[in-house]
Image (tube, rainbow, N blue to C red):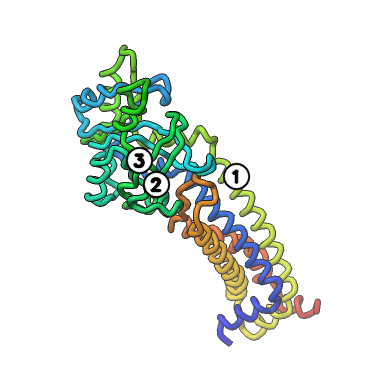
């Protein structure tokens, strides 16, 4: 009989127990996958932040505006190659639960600063030609079944009134984790229709020639506007995004704690299951040793049995988690990017394997130390 047949026979000896153990791993790894997706959604801005981009906001608060005239001065700062700006719009489409980011953007330079957002040249030109034009992300267009040419009514929130926009184009991300849930309108159109605070923007994003000099360039920018009515605070795009994540709490610690509790519980459950299985099969192990199986080989058979259950259950759970990310956004736009990266899948399988092996170490050692005469005498 081959070793594979021996392991297979052991697994199917107690079908219900094996199925429940595999199910435990599947549930644990499904939860692990969902937690990885949620963490990735919160960390999205940090992970995709450009190494060569800085964000310039008002030193008082990001909700305080900056003058439009700052753009030309930013371009004169040594190390800065491009500068663009945006402003939060904050309207409501049909229902307040239909949340998605809406930005009034600089139509002339926004595309050059964010090259990871791919859009057809013809669609961008249509956006430039239509003051009521809008560019929407592919995920957002799919969510509401929008197409180029559709007219989208939005009720103003920060900027009251009834607004309507024409979908001029749809942008797509060049990376799987890029945010394609945004809605861009033209800043000049917003400024024309705003009867107050004209000529101001929400924040600036600049590209720099050398990412290694980001700290020096940031100091130069803030020094340029020091002691002015609108002082600035400049951070790398990564630091800026991380600050937003911290406002939601220590998501990483919470997810790590929950995941740790789940895997520790799984370790105890699996360890108890393997201990029971080895105790029930003392006679079988004694017979195997009597016919020539070494102590080490018996140990490997027990470890292999546990590892197979862990990998099968873990693979099933991670597959279900991956399928869950393909069913759309259940959060109404609060977490637009639901993506389970390959690294999380590999990590999950590795953790499942480690838990499976650790849970079976003591039972496997017990089977290894089993003395044939004593085992057969107890039967």
Position of residue 129 relative to residue 233, above or below, is below
Q: Secondary structure at mark 3?
A: strand
* Residue under pointer 1: 257
Viewer-nearest of discs 1 and 3: 3
First in residue order: circle 1 vs circle 2: 2
Can you give x and y, in whole percent of width and height, for residue 91 in the image?
45, 36
In terms of image quadrants, where is residue 278?
bottom right
* Residue under pointer 3: 184
Q: Secondary structure at mark 2?
A: loop
Mark-to-mark CA distance, 2 and 3? 13 Å
Q: Residues within 10 Å of mark 3 (few under 14, many from 20)?
A: many
Q: Nearer the viewer, residue 220 or 147?
A: 147
Can you give x and y, in whole percent of width and height, for residue 182 in the image?
39, 43
Q: Is residue 116 visible?
A: yes
140 sits left or right of 224 in the view: right
Q: Residue at x 73, y 75 (%)?
A: 282
Q: Residue at x 33, y 22 (%)?
A: 198
Position of residue 310 relative to residue 122, above or below, is below
Query: Which label was assigned to residue 179?
Result: 2
Q: Residues within 10 Å of mark 2 (few under 14, many from 20)?
A: many
Q: Residue at x 40, y 32 (%)?
A: 88
Can you give x and y, in whole percent of width and height, for residue 332 in the image?
52, 46
Seen as rendered, the residue at the extreme right is 378
Position of residue 358 relative to residue 220, above or below, is below
Mark-to-mark CA distance, 1 and 2? 27 Å
Mark-to-mark CA distance, 1 and 3? 38 Å
In terms of image quadrants, where is residue 134?
top left
């Amino acid at each position: 009989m081959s070793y594979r047949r021996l392991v297979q026979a052991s697994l199917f000896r107690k079908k219900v127990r094996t199925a429940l153990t595999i199910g435990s791993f599947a549930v644990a790894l499904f939860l692990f996958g969902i937690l990885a997706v949620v963490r990735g959604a919160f960390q999205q801005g940090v992970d995709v932040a450009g190494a060569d981009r800085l964000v310039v906001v008002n030193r008082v608060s990001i909700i305080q505006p900056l003058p439009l005239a700052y753009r030309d001065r930013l371009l004169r700062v040594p190390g800065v190659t491009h500068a663009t700006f945006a402003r939060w719009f904050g309207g409501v489409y049909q229902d307040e639960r239909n949340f998605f980011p809406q930005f009034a953007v600089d139509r002339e330079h926004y595309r050059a600063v964010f090259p990871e957002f791919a859009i057809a040249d013809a669609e961008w030109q249509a956006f430039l030609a239509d003051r009521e034009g809008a560019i929407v992300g592919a995920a957002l267009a799919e969510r509401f079944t929008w197409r180029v040419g559709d007219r989208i009514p939005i009720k103003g929130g920060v900027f009251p009134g009834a607004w309507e926009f024409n979908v001029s184009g749809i942008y797509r991300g060049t990376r799987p984790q890029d945010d394609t849930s945004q809605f861009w309108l033209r800043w000049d159109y917003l400024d024309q229709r705003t009867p107050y605070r004209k000529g101001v923007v929400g924040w600036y994003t600049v590209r720099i020639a050398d990412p290694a000099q980001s700290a020096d360039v940031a100091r130069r920018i803030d020094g340029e506007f020091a002691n002015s009515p609108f002082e600035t605070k400049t951070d790398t795009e990564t630091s800026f995004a991380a600050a937003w994540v911290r406002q939601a709490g220590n998501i990483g610690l919470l997810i790590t704690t929950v995941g740790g509790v789940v895997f520790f519980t799984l370790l105890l459950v699996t360890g108890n299951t393997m201990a029971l299985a080895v105790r029930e099969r003392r006679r079988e192990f004694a017979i195997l040793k009597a016919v020539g199986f070494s102590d080490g080989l018996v140990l490997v058979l027990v470890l292999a049995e546990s590892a197979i259950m862990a990998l099968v259950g873990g693979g099933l759970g991670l597959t279900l988690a991956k399928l869950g990310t393909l069913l759309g956004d259940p959060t109404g736009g609060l977490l637009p990017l639901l993506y389970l990266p390959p690294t999380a899948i590999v990590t999950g399988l590795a953790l499942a394997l480690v838990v499976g092996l650790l849970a079976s170490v003591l039972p496997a050692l017990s089977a290894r130390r089993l003395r044939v005469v004593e085992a057969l005498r107890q039967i």
